[in-house]
Amino acid sequence: MGLDRERRYRPPVNDYARRILAIDAHVLILDKPAGLAVHPGPATPHSLEAHLIQLREGFVRSPQPAHRLDRDTSGCLVLGRHPKALKRLMALFAEGRVAKTYWAIVDGAPDGDAGEIDAPLHKVSTAADGWRMVVNPAGKPARTRWQVLERGPRSLIEFMPVTGRTHQIRVHAAALGTPIVDDPVYGAAGRGSDLGPMLLHARRVVVPYADDRPPVDATAPLPGHWPT
């Protein structure tokens, strides 16, 4: 994979049904595009919530996200297709039973080819900069396994979070000395930079929804704004 790219990004067309990676009677896994928030907020009035009706696939209810991805993170997003499924999925995420794999292009390269980051995370906030997560022994436990897939001035790293803290991979990547390219908060360019979507992708998710059936397993293709 070449790691040079043009800093331009075009959001995908709004045909979200075509972005379904896996579906059964309970679980839907969507390939979420970068640049789209999962939930609306003051800075993100347009969100996936406006498009959930496209994902009913014959059901009366729209599916609902069982977790969240940052706005500029692309890839596998798990949704529950009915209230009981949503409750089950949220419990699986809370118990750490959902296996998640992320790919990121980072600035630089870490020492070694694989390892685990064990660095508790704590939320801080200031009037000037807003909130962010920082490594702090007093924070909540956070662990991430990592493996280098390609090494260079910009490297491709696979991250496998053991815990599920807010911004965990982004902060841990920076703590490793290899911040994610175009991360506006924890990246090399710093907060507020006018960059393209950060290069973090939820590559694969494995959901053990039912004990008597194989898990729901989906892999998201790399998005078009990534280098090839």
Image (cartoon, rainbow, N blue to C red):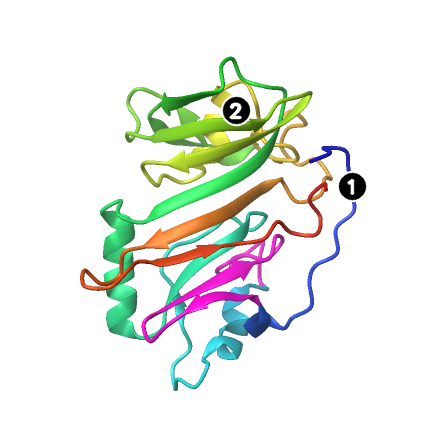
In-front residue for pair 92/155: 155
Secondary structure found at label 2 = helix
Q: Which mark is residue 7?
A: 1
Residue most extreme to the left: 212
Which residue is found at the position 22% from the left and 63% from the top?
210
Whole-percent x, y for residue 169 in the image: 46, 34
Left/right of residue 121 with respect to residue 114 in the rendered view: left
Which residue is found at the position 75% from the left and 50% from the top?
9
For label 2, the crowd category at 10 Å Cα-Cα, with few meaning under 14, some 14 to 19 and many 20 or more, is some
Figure check: 19 above or below 2 = below
* In the image, residue 130 lies in the stretch drawn in magenta: no
Left/right of residue 19 with respect to residue 145 in the rendered view: right
What amino acid type should be assigned to the residue bearing mark 1? Arg
Left/right of residue 137 with respect to residue 151 in the rendered view: left
Residue most extreme to the top: 111
Whole-percent x, y for residue 107 in the image: 64, 24
Is residue 126 shown to the viewer in this render?
A: no
In the rendered structure, which segment of residues is drawn in magenta? 19-45
Is residue 91 shown to the viewer in this render?
A: yes
Q: Where, by quadrant of the figure, is residue 77 drawn?
A: bottom left
Q: Which mark is residue 63?
A: none
Answer whether labels 2 and 1 touch (C-beta < 8 Å). Answer: no
What amino acid type should be assigned to the residue bearing mark 2? Ala
Label 2, label 1: how many angstroms apart (C-alpha)?
21 Å
Q: Which residue is mark 2?
A: 174
For label 1, the crowd category at 10 Å Cα-Cα, with few meaning under 14, some 14 to 19 and many 20 or more, is few
In-front residue for pair 107/167: 107
Whole-percent x, y for residue 170 in the image: 50, 33
